[in-house]
């Protein structure tokens, strides 16, 4: 019998959700590897990235093993990806600030979360991605914040391209989950 030494204190699973093309995969690569991949390849089904982080709580460092699940945004994969909602401890809901429809679809994603998540009030951070494309913005920060306030969730603007606020978004969610 082989025993495996666990070198972390907590295993935490987060799920990224949102329409296809909003930058979920790029967001996760930026967070885990600090790089932006210029070639767009649509996620088929589900994939995941991992990262180890230290989380300080009341002066105590906790070793966290993050599993960040990357879901396909296309409608045809929804039944597959919703099966992963129940095992996730938090959700990063991403829309594209240059794409009106991806913002309007946040409501649909929230309904799916309410239906399939592990509890009635899951921990969620709403990310307005592609903040580096401010000149193409169609969703104002005020409008996005109003939607987040309606759902009583955190809102942050990110750029998977530059890395702006990507780690901060994950940290926000980690703070919510660790409380």
Image (cartoon, rainbow, N blue to C red):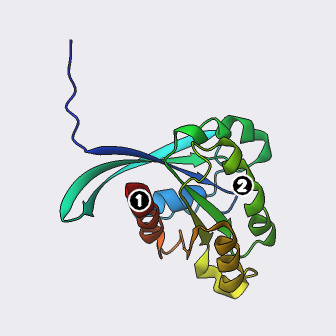
How packed mark 2 is, by other alpha carbons closer than 10 Å (few <14, some 14-19, many 20 or more), is some
- Horizontal relation, residue 75 to residue 69: left or right: right
From where the camera sits, is residue 19 visible? no
Name the N-terminal-most of marks 1 and 2: 2
| Residue occupying image coordinates x 66% and y 42% | 116
From where the camera sits, is residue 58 visible? yes
Residue 153, compared with residue 112, is above or below; it is below
Secondary structure type for disc 1: helix
**Quadrant location of the N terminus in the rendered image:** top left
**Quadrant location of the C terminus in the rendered image:** bottom left
| Residue occupying image coordinates x 59% and y 53% | 121
Q: How many marks?
A: 2
Q: CA distance from mark 1 to mark 2?
A: 20 Å
Mark 2 lies on residue: 109
How packed mark 1 is, by other alpha carbons closer than 10 Å (few <14, some 14-19, many 20 or more), is many
Q: Position of residue 111 (x, y in %)?
A: 74, 52
Mark 1 lies on residue: 174
| Residue occupying image coordinates x 49% and y 47% | 89
Q: Position of residue 170 (x, y in %)?
A: 45, 63
| Residue occupying image coordinates x 73% and y 41% | 78
Secondary structure type for disc 2: helix
């Amino acid at each position: 019998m082989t025993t495996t030494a666990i070198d972390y204190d907590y295993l935490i699973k987060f799920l990224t959700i949102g329409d296809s093309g909003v930058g979920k995969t790029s967001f996760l690569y930026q967070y885990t590897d600090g790089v932006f991949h210029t070639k767009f390849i649509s996620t088929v089904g589900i994939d995941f990235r991992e990262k180890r982080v230290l989380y300080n709580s009341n002066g105590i460092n906790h070793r966290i093993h993050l599993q960040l699940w990357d879901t396909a945004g296309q409608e045809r994969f929804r039944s597959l990806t919703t099966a992963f909602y129940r095992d996730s401890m938090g959700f990063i809901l991403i829309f594209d600030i240059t794409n009106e429809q991806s913002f309007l679809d946040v409501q649909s994603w929230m309904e799916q979360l309410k239906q399939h998540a592990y509890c009635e009030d899951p921990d969620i951070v709403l990310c307005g991605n592609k903040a580096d494309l401010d000149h193409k913005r169609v969703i104002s920060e005020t409008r996005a914040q109003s939607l987040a306030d309606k759902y009583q969730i955190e809102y942050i603007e990110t750029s998977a391209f530059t890395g702006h606020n990507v780690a901060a978004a994950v940290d926000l969610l980690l703070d919510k989950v660790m409380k």
